[in-house]
Every structure is written in structure tokens, then in C-alpha cells.
Image (cartoon, rainbow, N blue to C red):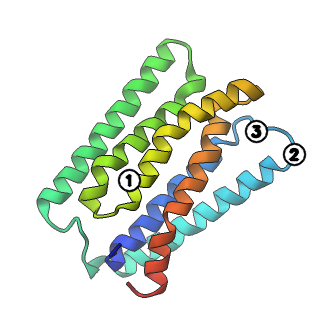
Amino acid sequence: MDFLLRDAAMTLAVFGFFSAAWFGWAQERPPAGAARWLLGAGSSLGTLAAAAGGLLAWRHWNGGSVLAEDPDMNLYLIILGVESGLALLGVLVLLAMGRSDYFAPWVCLVVGAHFFPLAPVLANPVLYVLGAWLTAWPFLAVRWAHRQDLAPSFTTGTGAGPALLLAALPAVAALLTGV
């Protein structure tokens, strides 16, 4: 996969930020024991990745991007708008049904699905793998939550947070090698 320096940095920043968010969401009702410090460590690592990626993106902002062309940027914004709208709509429906415990799995499902149209726009095939995982994981996470009497936000976050960090590794490699 070929990254432009700015795109690699932005990938690290975005995936780091959202991995920290998912690790944070997983802290809603974690089981007693080691899970809490692992979730905190994941949140910290995601935050560091986001900060490093953001700083590098800022330093290399004029380095070019796959989104430099207007049609690509417009399609990117449309995909993000549809994703946000679907996530919000689902959350509102779940809220009306009194099922706020399913917010995290719903949002994870929508986020996963949005990576499929986003992958060709960003010229990043890793997004297909990430999309497949984040689309399938909520179903597994809910099943796990029910079987072990855990919060669905915990089980969802423990699969989404690490997946986003792992998906950032090609961007890290590109940044370390100078793209």
C-alpha cells in the first residue's frame, strides 16, 4: 500500500483517536481484575498515536493527499455524512426502545460498514479488512456480553479499540520509512 506522508499521518491520528475512544467506551462496566489497566493502557496508546499522527500531519500538511482532488474529497465527506446520520438514527431508535446498552454495537456496525466505500476513495485496502472486522464484531460482542453478563459496550470496545490500532500499523511503517 502506498501512502503519502500526510495521509499516513492522518491515518495514525484518526485511528489512534478512535481506538482511544473505543477503549474508553469499553470501560463502562469492565469485569474486575486486569481488564481495567489494559483498557487504560489501550486508551493511552491510542491517545499517543493520535497526538503523534496529528503532529506529523500538521508538519507535512502540504505533502499531498489522495483527497486533494475535489471529487474524492466530496465523496469522502458524503460517506462520513451518511455514516454519521445512520449512527445517529440508530442511536435515536435504540434510545426510544430503551436499549441504550446497544449503542456501542450499533455504532461499531455502522463504522465498520463505512470502511467499505471509504477504502477505494482513500486507496487503502486495509480498510476492507478493518471494515469486515468491525462489521462482524458487534454480533460476536453482543453474544459474548449476553453469555458472560458483561456490558455490550465493554465487549464491543475490546474488539474495536485493538482493531483500529492494528489497522494503523501500515501507516506507522510508512511514516518510519519516510514513505
Mark 3 or 1: the one toward you: 1
Q: Between residues 60 and 33, which one lies in front from this camera angle?
A: 33
Give the amino acid type for the residue marked by disc 3 in the picture: Pro
User: Split into 4 quadrants, where in the image is the N terminus?
Assistant: bottom left
- Measured in 3D between alpha carbons, the distance from the residue under mark 2 to the one under mark 3, in whole angstroms, is 9 Å
Label ID, residue 30: 3
**Residue 63: image location, x then y, percent:** 28, 81
Label ID, residue 33: 2
Q: Which element carries disc 1, helix, strand or loop?
A: helix
Say if residue 119 shows up in the picture.
yes
Mark 1 or 2: the one toward you: 1
Q: What residue is pinned by disc 1?
A: 128
Give the amino acid type for the residue marked by disc 2 in the picture: Gly
Q: Residue at 45% across / 81% down in the picture? A: 175
Q: Which element carries disc 2, helix, strand or loop?
A: loop
Give the amino acid type for the residue marked by disc 1 in the picture: Tyr
User: In the image, 83: left or right of 68?
Assistant: right
Q: Which element carries disc 3, helix, strand or loop?
A: loop
Q: Residue at 46% across / 75% down in the picture? A: 55
